[in-house]
Amino acid sequence: MNPNTDFIPFAKPVLGVEEEEAVLRIMRSGWLTTGSETLAFEKEFADFVDSPRALAVNSATSGLHLALEALGIGKGDTVITSPYTFTSSAAVVRHLGAEVKFCDTTFDSYNIDPIELERVLASTKNCRAIVVVHVGGLPCDMEAILPLARRYGCAVVEDAAHAFPSRIQAGYAGTLGDVGVYSFYATKTITTGEGGMIVSANEKLATRMATMRTHGIDREVWDRYTSSTPSWAYQVMEAGFKYNLPDILSAIGRVQLRKANGFLNERRSIATSYDKAFSGSPGLTIPPRGEGHAWHLYSLRVDPEKAGMNRDTLIEALASKGVGASVHFIPLHIMPYYAERYGLTPDSFPHALSLYNDTLSLPIWQGMGADRATRVAAAVLSALDTGRR
Ligand SMILES: Cc1ncc(COP(=O)(O)O)c(C=O)c1O
């Protein structure tokens, strides 16, 4: 690939020979589904984020579903989350028959606004949990959120799909609430193609999630085939799900995990170079910074009046210059399902709407390199220059 001329995608998984060799090792081992490789991945991940327990799952969506199920969320309950997120954060609430209540974001972080959260909590009956989303990899204000949640008797589930590895003084994002869920989807900071990881320090919740992850069966398949008790013997304790992560994918995850800190450094240096290029440029607002940013996304805000063009035109101009860009997020309150179910209008959550209207996510991936980052920044600035003329 030529960094000076080739199309620069918005995201790109970076997998090397080590990942290839790890997959071959599993393919040749004769054990493809969840087994010793996944157990090793869970142990290594738990050690990395300093959590007593990690459970590998086939997606973050499955992990969020398991988390809320283990917390006993169901019909008659309400769960608060931000509309500025992917549908999974809210859809899992509906899977369990509970209702979603949205709480707007703050421009300071693009995350749920703790001041607004207090107001929403005070006016919400039967709120049992808050799903906080560390948008783009910038941790939410957990110092404000956790005591609030405690005061209102709500559990906190961290949607850390974007937030690996995001470390703040109190610990890794994902380990600060009752349950944390990470995503290893293809565009995420470490990937297994599809996959996710749940962490929790609450043994009771972890045990429930582990059982429900595999059909509600009391023994893991691996345990059945390796223990001295006959392999056919198991008990179905609940009507569970099929959310386990197979060993082939865990093998990729273990290699990616070893590279995670290096990936983070590369992402950080791309974000710094973008910040330098865009700071002071009329009409552009660089993304909020803060402790422990994982830089899954670099989301730039465009003020159409000052920048001379709106976000959509800028994305088109970038595409013509060989640069991919994306939009995070189309807020849930303007999606037909949530708008209709809860009678919401675009103005119901003005911050989430404004972020959606004016923000674009620029390419940021390990292996992208300084030259491509320079090309992206130059493409943004020259597009705006042309727009102003
Ligand atoms: C904030 C957020 N939460 C959850 C998910 C779901 O992740 P997965 O694709 O692993 O289910 C995503 C997916 O991109 C996401 O952006």
Image (tube, rainbow, N blue to C red):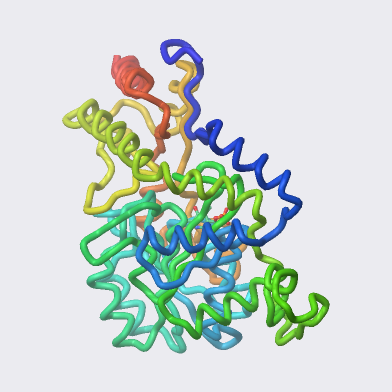
Residue farthest along the left direction in this orientation: 280
| 204 left or right, relative to 178 | right
Q: Is residue 288 above or below residue 196?
A: above
In the image, 324 versus 179, the foreground residue is 179
Q: Is residue 274 above or below residue 253?
A: above
Residue farthest along the front direction in this orientation: 228
Residue farthest along the right direction in this orientation: 232
In the image, 299 versus 199, the foreground residue is 199
Q: Position of residue 76 (x, y in %)?
A: 56, 88
| 377 left or right, relative to 198 | left
Could you tell me which quadrant the C terminus lies in? top left
Q: Residue at x 25, y 47 (%)?
A: 288
Q: Residue at x 29, y 36 (%)?
A: 303
Number of numbered markers: 0
In the image, 104 versus 275, the foreground residue is 275
Q: Residue at x 35, y 39 (%)?
A: 262
For residue 359, which quarter of the picture? top left
Q: Position of residue 67 (x, y in %)?
A: 53, 74
Q: Position of residue 196 (x, y in %)?
A: 54, 58
| 29 left or right, relative to 68 | right
Q: Position of residue 383 (x, y in %)?
A: 36, 19
Q: Is residue 189 above or below residue 12?
A: below
